[in-house]
Amino acid sequence: MARGMAGTDASTGAGTGGSERVEIVTRGERRRSFSAEEKVRLVAETFQPGETVTTVSRRHGICTSLLHRWRRAARGEVPSRRAARPRLLPVRLVAPDAGPTASPPPPVPDIAPVPIEVVLRNGRVLRVAVTTGLAAVARRAAAREA
């Protein structure tokens, strides 16, 4: 190996002499499935005095996040990432009559206002503040659909 130029050596920085050991770990096994009884037994094991989720998971060769998920399910908790997913509903915007206009709702303290997104017929997206009046939204939508 030529060492004349700086930066030409490939190394892990683990040492400079001799040979380096590289270990490649592959998953030769298929995905395991656990029965309800096994899950209950493993979760109960994590609640024993002196036991932790980490020690139980290492002893049985399973991921700690899987044991945490089973513990949350045993407590009846719903996964947060699915509960927080927003749902989009179709909305039809109708221009107001010449009658009295309703005042916008008062802002809620400690909550940042989130813009409302209106998907127009031509595919464009109109983003407006929650406090924007209905007549102003109708004018903007009409201008962008033209």
Image (cartoon, helix red, strand yellow):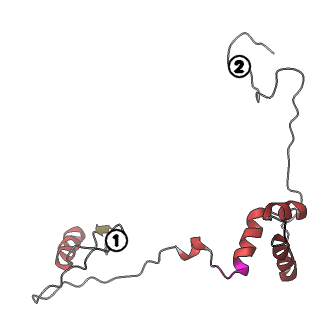
Location of mark 1 (residue): 117
The quadrant of the image that shows the C terminus is bottom left
The amino acid beneath tag 1 is Glu
- At 69% from the left and 12% from the top, the residue drawn is 5
The local secondary structure at tag 2 comes to loop
Q: Which mark is residue 8?
A: 2
Query: In the figure, is residue 38 to the left or right of 2?
Result: right
Query: In the figure, is residue 138 to the left or right of 86?
Result: left
Q: Residues within 10 Å of mark 2 (few under 14, many from 20)?
A: few
Question: In the rendered view, would you say 143 is above or below 12?
Answer: below
Write the start and end of the magenta stretch as one range: 73-77
Q: Which residue is nearer to you in this view: 79 or 88? A: 79
Q: Quadrant of residue 55?
A: bottom right
Question: In the rendered view, would you say 120 is above or below 100?
Answer: above
- At 52% from the left and 73% from the top, the residue drawn is 84
Q: CA distance from mark 1 to mark 2?
A: 53 Å
Of the image marks 1 and 2, the number of the one nearer the N terminus: 2
The amino acid beneath tag 2 is Thr
Q: Quadrant of residue 95?
A: bottom left
